[in-house]
Amino acid sequence: MAPNSINGEANDDQESVTIPLLTSERSNVNSTSQVAIVGANVCPIESLDYEIAENDLFKQDWRSGGKIHIFQYVFMKWLLCFLIGLIVSLIGFFNNLAVENIAGLKFVVTSNMMLAKRFGMAFLVFSVSNLTLTLFASIITAFIAPAAAGSGIPEVKAYLNGVDAPGIFSLRTLIVKIIGSISAVSSSLFVGKAGPMVHTGACVAALLGQGGSKRFRLTWRWLHFFRNDRDRRDLVTCGSAAGIAAGFRAPVGGVLFALEEMASWWRSVLLWRSFFTTAVVAIVLRALIDFCLSGKCGLFGKGGLIMFDVYSASVTYHLIDVPPALALGVIGGILGSLYNFLLDKVLRIYNLINEKGIAYKIFLACAISVSTSCLLFGLPWLASCQPCPSDASESCPTIGRSGNFKKFQCPPGHYNDLASLIFNTNDDAVRNLFSKNTNSEFQYSSILIFFVTCFFLSIFSCGIVAPAGLFVPVIVTGASYGRFVGMLVGSHSSLNHGLYAVLGAASFLGGSMRMTVSLCVIILELTNNLLLLPLIMLVLLISKTVADAFNGNIFDLIMKAKGFPYLESHAEPYMRQLTVGDVVTGPLQVFQGIEKVGNILHVLRTTRHNGFPVIDEPPLSESPVLYGLILRAHLIELLKKKAFMSAPVPTSIDALKLFSAGDFAETRSGNGDKIEELRFTEEEMEMFLDLHPFTNASPYTVVETMSLAKALILFREVGLRHLLVMPKISGHSFKSEVFPSATLLLYLVVWQSSLMKEESDASTPFQVFEDMLKDNISSRTGNLVVPDLGAEVMSDVGPRDVMIYVAGSLGDPDEGDILKLDLIMPLIETLPLEEGLASHLPEGHCTPEDILDLLQSPPFHQQMDSFTYVLRTGHIDLSQFRINL
């Protein structure tokens, strides 16, 4: 009994693994980063192997290890977690310190020129410095490491879901991410550094996990311990948690962020290690901040956006304060979904501009920088000067440093409230909005102008060829309208305006990023005020609920646009009506337990599959039986070492004598030797390989009647790349991939036939074209391939009428049997069904009776019922059939 494998893509679509899904159809524009959306070259996205290959070699190696080996394994994991926390905290501190001093120096020079009434020169210095920093960040990103563009969170999230793309964790990406993020944030662009810190932490973890960078010959043998995807996944999860902890000094929030948003697979041991990693980050940052508070880190080096410690005092609120909080939640949900929608559209427009070349990418970044500089310098002139309050907690006006009262162009004793927000770093703007006892500091018009500017500039700044985070811009934007609501409520609430700014930031974060628990803890750790917990929880829940009614979270939208196939945690309702046998495609490539070298070489060179079922047939077994699954990388390693035999007989050679477990630790063929690089003589091509010692004898195997929903859950929960599907009945004569395509084709044929009988112009020609598309239904390209059924009906009736008729009439039992003989047989004899189904039927000529037997088989009737259900209930996306209603 030969198995069917949910196995890669078909031969006639060998390039599907390299082409992402930017829309419902394949596109030639891809990505591993924001640069990908903006026209980078296609990169081969590859799935990760989280499953342990339990072959004979693995078992012997595991048995040979003692307690010392186990202790070393556990100790090295904890040691690497410590190193990740230490390195990420140092990078986070360096980022904050550099941004504070570079941006601070820029604003000091500009402010001094403003005091001297040299406004034109001040604008020139401000805009040129911003342009220089942006140009530097975009050039190093575009030419050195395109994968460093954007926040990096979608890349890390896709990796933890099981999808890898070359370059996202390389040493070059790490260096460019750090330097580019400092330059972009210092250039006054509305971008943040918290998102890039997540990518930075993941890069540090991945490099430590693989022992360094082979490309730059910076490797350490003592770190060559975790060379498999499973262990590296755990380290990258800890690295992403450390990134958030370093960006906000929120250790618990970092752990929850990794759990809620990033990781697709979690366990208690991983929770402990990630918590330990973030604890190291918190301790190191606390020590470094205390060092900077003594004045040894430069004029502005006091930690940057690490903690807005502004609400240590007690906060009291009453029932009357709840309605404004509810309103903020609804506003945050609506604005957050609108923000996501507009950002997605802007990124697609950027794609059209930037796919023309690197010069266009850099020019776009420079254009955004110049526009931002003009707005930041010009808009404060629209605000009127305000007299300094007599009870100000700090000097007013603020001259030559950050503060709440920027002088800008105002006379002595006055300040410009809009300049205090917009002509400042994002971190200082958030501090000013969050500040307490400043209820009369800002005007309504200034807050409204600042909100609109932040909202749109953050959208247009995201997507340029530079490291750009979204957390801080979203916090600034939410805090601005939150403070505006607080000003509207005024004395009717016991909460001060700064607290409304905090609630506004929470609502906009919940509306755009759709997280709840982790954002709640991050905000609490940022503001150092536990008394706000109930209101923050309420705002986050409402904003997420409202926004979910419109679209997905911002990271998922970007990840989809970049072409990363992502496996969701839930199954769609229509998947309950389909089985795994309905979605497998062929032809299936299998190997015998003892296979000829030439056959292996041919299959590897002509397919992109990563795993192949191994079958034992007589005389190795009494009947055909599935022995297991062997990986492509393992086959390449066997061919490279030329462990051949001259005769096809089982061998008793001890595998450990020829190979070590380390030879098969790296399972991804994309990072190892290429099959095209191997050369063999004619004599070697006729020799044999015994695959038994290297085959995973216990792969995950399911029966073909398992529902598609169960298969999806199994893929995600276990972290699979391959799943073998076994026929339930021996001697199954039908190809499983025939039924979905034949069903839809038959629906359309019968529909047209009925119309032809009813209409007077029954001679109108009818054409049905079948187009089989191979698209991934899971996050693992090369795992679970579904035939998307394309059909175009050339008639005067639109596609909507087709589907309404199919779902409404054909599935109605009152209409009679759709497959009755007097209706089907004339169609089989007159329409080119055999030609349309040629790729799915057995080889050779098929008579009308053969096709009739196929269409009247029980499996086909089951398919008819399933498709009728999903069409009538609307649980299937008709765009996958290229039918637009």
Image: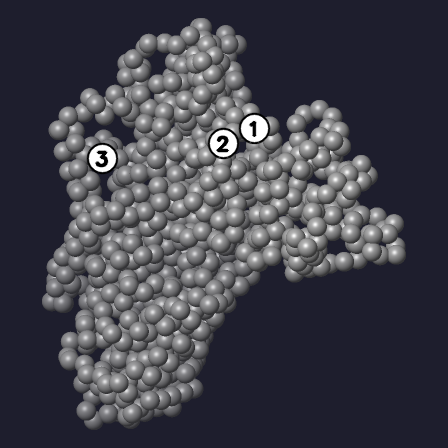
**Element class at badge 3:** helix
Q: Which of marks 2 and 3 is in front?
A: 2
List x then y, in percent, for residue 463. Answer: 46, 59
Q: Which amino acid does label 3 sit on?
A: Leu
Q: Name the residue under label 1.
A: 732
Calculate the distance from the C-alpha at mark 1 to the C-alpha at mark 2.
Answer: 8 Å
Query: Is any atom of residue 264 visible in this view?
Result: yes
Q: Mark 2 points at which residue?
A: 728
List x then y, in percent, for residue 843. Answer: 67, 25
Q: Which residue is drawn at 24% across and 92% down?
A: 389
| 460 or 357, nearer to the observer | 460
Q: Which amino acid does label 2 sit on?
A: Lys
**Quadrant of the drawing holding the C terminus:** bottom right
**Element class at badge 1:** loop
Calculate the distance from the C-alpha at mark 1 to the C-alpha at mark 3.
Answer: 51 Å
Q: How crowded is mark 2: few (under 14 residues within 10 Å), some or many (20 or more)?
A: some
Q: What residue type is labelled 1?
A: His
Q: Name the residue under label 3.
A: 223
| 3 or 208, nearer to the observer | 3
Q: How crowded is mark 1: few (under 14 residues within 10 Å), some or many (20 or more)?
A: few
Q: Earlier in the sequence, mark 2 or mark 3?
A: 3
List x then y, in percent, for residue 848. Answer: 76, 32
Looking at the image, residue 239 lies above or below residue 531: above
**Element class at badge 2:** loop
